[in-house]
Image (cartoon, rainbow, N blue to C red):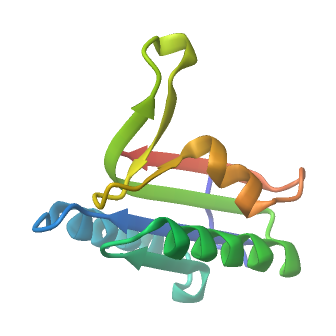
Amino acid sequence: MLTPNHDQLAVLIGAPQPGNLSMHHDLGLMYNVLRHRGLDPSQIVSMEGQLDRTILMNFLRSIGKRVRERMIRTLFLYVTGNGFYVGTKPESAAPGLDLGNGEHVLWEEIWPILDLNPQTKVLVLPDH
């Protein structure tokens, strides 16, 4: 659970399809909820817009570095966008995020990029 504590970081990512404003509103709502729960604005990092793989992966890489360097103990990751998966059977499907420009990022690609310490607690809320 996120409470006012300086060893926590909330990361909000919005990857809307062209013309879709709902993800912008999702991020605003989540930001307000986190502030209401006592998180300082410096503990909330967000990125939104027409993202491509390179931009998103570089952002996530920088988040992982920040978590390691500042010894963040809890990372809250909220991602809003259109879902995507590879595979034909539920048990073998690999879910991810459709960036809307013909590019996709699978959840299994995100964890190695973040490169988090095993002690870091991660709360993930995918909204797609």
Q: Relative to 36, is 93 above or below?
A: above
Question: Residue 44 in the image: x percent, y percent?
Answer: 54, 78
Please tell me which residue lies in front, 35 or 21.
21
Q: Is residue 37 in view from this perspective?
A: no
Name the residue at the left extreme: 19
Question: Residue 82 in the image: x percent, y percent?
Answer: 30, 48
Please tell me which residue lies in front, 28 or 23.
23
Q: From the image, which quarter does the C terminus lie in? A: top left
- Residue sitting at x 86%, y 80%: 69
Name the residue at the front extreme: 102
Number of marks in the image? Answer: 0
Instruction: Locate residue 35 relative to residue 60 in the image: left or right.
Output: left
Q: Relative to 43, is 92 above or below?
A: above
- Can you tell which quarter of the image residue 114 is in? bottom right
Name the residue at the bottom extreme: 42
Instruction: Locate residue 121 relative to residue 124 in the image: left or right.
Output: right
Question: Residue 94 in the image: x percent, y percent?
Answer: 53, 30
Please tell me which residue lies in front, 10 or 68.
68
Q: Relative to 84, is 4 above or below?
A: below
- Can you tell which quarter of the image residue 116 is in? bottom right
Question: Residue 70 in the image: x percent, y percent?
Answer: 83, 81
- Residue sitting at x 21%, y 61%: 17
- Residue sitting at x 67%, y 61%: 75
- Residue sitting at x 48%, y 47%: 125
- Can you tell which quarter of the image residue 35 is in? bottom left
Q: Is residue 112 in view from this perspective?
A: yes
